[in-house]
Amino acid sequence: MYFIFALLGETLLLPLLVAAHDPTNTVHLSPSRHAPPDASNAVAKDFISLSIAIHWFQDYTRQEQGLHPNTFSRNLLQSLADSTSLPPQIRIGGTSADRTTYVPSQEEPILTVSGDNGIPLNVTLGPKWFHQCFDHSNFPRGMKFTFDLPLVRNDSLALNNTLTGAGWALEAIGKDRFVAFEIGNEEDLYTSQGVVPSSWSVKDYVERWKTFSRAVQEKILSPAGFEARKKWFQGLVFAGLGNNPAWTTKTAFDAGVDEDGFLSSVSLHNYPVGSAPWVSLGRTFMNHAAIVANLSQVNDDIALLQSSKSTRDIDFILGETNIDFVNLNMNQFEGVLGSALWTIDYILYGAFLNIKRMNLHQGTTFGYAAWQPVPVNGIQPQVRAPFYGLKFAAEALGGHQEPTQIVPLDAGQSHLSAYAIYESSRLARVAIINFLEWNATRIDGPRPISEIEINLGRSTRVVRTRTLTAPAGASADNDITFGGVMWNFTTRGLPVRAPNVEGERTVSVGRDGIAKVHVGASEALLVSI
Ligand SMILES: *[C@@H]1O[C@H](CO)[C@@H](O)[C@H](O)[C@H]1NC(C)=O
Ligand SMILES: *[C@@H]1O[C@H](CO)[C@@H](O)[C@H](O)[C@H]1NC(C)=O
Ligand SMILES: *[C@@H]1O[C@H](CO)[C@@H](O)[C@H](O)[C@H]1NC(C)=O
Ligand SMILES: *[C@@H]1O[C@H](CO)[C@@H](O)[C@H](O)[C@H]1NC(C)=O
Ligand SMILES: *[C@@H]1O[C@H](CO)[C@@H](O)[C@H](O)[C@H]1NC(C)=O
Ligand SMILES: *[C@@H]1O[C@H](CO)[C@@H](O)[C@H](O)[C@H]1NC(C)=O
């Protein structure tokens, strides 16, 4: 094993080539020096978490057909943990988890029957899958897991199957790493998938969920020392974030989903769009107003949970989310620098709204995956653009041990999104995203640059800045750097300093308390104070 360390702290002043900068158009940001009253609650250190489709989990954890720990994945997870002081949590689940059968006699760790959109019709797991995939050597220290069990089946062996999975998962994950079970996945879509009668309603879901959760609690959790009152379930797991009024946090609680007091969290899923012909990188995803509109749908759910004493301590989570519910053949919008900017804005705005955690969904072949963990179709494993979005957001939120809060700043221009991040109430960082879509191949000239004056007050002398960029612009899927650093498969996911790219920069604050910084089109800038 070898290590390559990023050369941080280096100051390189490259001339801004042909800067299309319009001085009359300078943007002013005036973050308050102490956390304002409308800042978020304390952001969880594992706010940025992952969800991995169950049929891809072995790829993210093991290599060479499951024989060895996937050190490439482990290093990337460690890199996120280094930023926030806690590794991301992983939720293992999805439609494929709901279609899983646990087979005691199966020698192979996993067998699948392939289906549409990268999601198998059937998954069977043997005991070996659990032993290999949850081996401690696969992960950084401190990883925690939520595991999704099947609910969709309604035959005489269905409950026995779910209990078998619960027992195997609990044993493999262990007491220190287990967070919760989910049971079922996107039950609001069961009717459209034709797996339940068309009359299936949230009441039917709640009835079935109660039968299954009571059995899992009584037969698996309690005997292993996980007492019911300590709450071991993440509930709902609906696909629709407010788009189906019959399936909401309110309708589920009205139907008695938490009658037993089992829920530690409510999870809903969100993907803003699919493959409609009007979807475009610039308008649809590099769009702060659209992100705000999409995420603000959680406000009702969070307000409902906060409104009563019995539900106030139940966390609200986006337990499976990403840019687009179409996984495949969407490379023009997914896995590019512009989509990494979406990832940053989506995470930071979600943290501001007091969502407790976001699990960004991953799969080996998915277009929005942050990395491809194993070779597939002759393509070597690779770090993909969304990883840079996760890493930037992780650095923006940071790993301060006392409360960290976040609040959006008004930059006065619709293509700029900015946030102030506070540590123990004091301004620590400013993150700026420039959503102006620009490609180096475009005929309209050099990369436009926004000049931004940040009023920091006279007590600050210097700030450090790091830019997320790629020479090709918004549609770049390679040569992406953050603060001059790259994460590459060639270095097993360890950071390397990219040659000929400006690294971290030191910017002096003027006597007027103003730091002047520049953010190019389709770039993001992190300012550390
Ligand atoms: C899935 O596989 C299991 C185990 O082999 C089998 O019992 C079940 O019928 C299969 N289901 C489907 C839908 O193919
Ligand atoms: C499932 O059913 C089998 C066969 O009846 C039984 O041996 C096994 O103990 C059951 N598993 C659980 C977890 O109840
Ligand atoms: C479950 O199975 C029973 C018996 O086969 C059937 O009557 C019922 O409609 C099913 N319910 C659902 C919700 O699928
Ligand atoms: C979510 O974002 C998409 C893509 O920008 C947009 O078309 C859709 O209207 C948004 N939904 C809501 C509820 O804001
Ligand atoms: C940017 O370039 C990509 C391919 O390199 C192209 O698909 C896309 O349409 C371009 N976008 C704009 C706005 O020019
Ligand atoms: C990172 O990987 C890419 C693709 O494999 C390669 O082109 C580039 O040279 C690598 N950079 C470094 C610094 O190793």
Image (cartoon, helix red, strand yellow):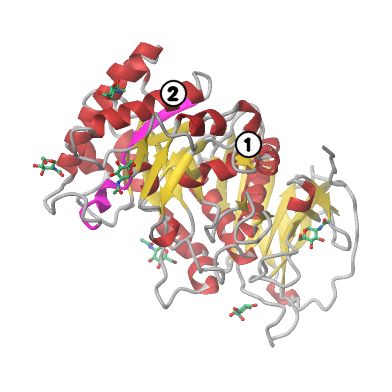
Task: Give x and y (percent) for residue 195.
Answer: 22, 51
Q: CA distance from mark 1 to mark 2?
A: 22 Å
Residue picked out by circle 2: 170
Q: Which mark is residue 282?
A: none
Task: Give x and y (percent) for residue 337.
Answer: 64, 64
Q: Amino acid at mark 2?
A: Leu
Residue at horizontal 45 percent and vertical 73 percent from the top: 279
Residue at horizontal 52 percent and vertical 24 percent from the top: 177
Q: Amino acid at mark 1?
A: Leu
Q: Secondary structure at mark 2?
A: helix
Q: Considering depth in this image, is 216 or 210 the residue closer to the camera? A: 216
**Left or right of 181 on screen, residue 464:** right
Q: Considering depth in this image, is 183 or 475 the residue closer to the camera? A: 183
Task: Give x and y (percent) for residue 255.
Answer: 17, 37
Residue at horizontal 65 percent and vertical 29 percent from the top: 137
- For this orientation, the residue located farthest to the bottom is 443
Foreground mark, 1 or 2, reads 1
Q: Secondary structure at mark 1?
A: loop
| Quadrant position of the N terminus in the picture | top right
Q: Quadrant of ligand 5?
A: bottom right
Q: Which mark is residue 67?
A: 1
Residue at horizontal 42 percent and vertical 61 percent from the top: 117
Q: Is residue 332 above or below residue 394?
A: below
Q: Within 10 angstroms of label 2, few (less than 14), some, or many (20 or more) residues?
A: many
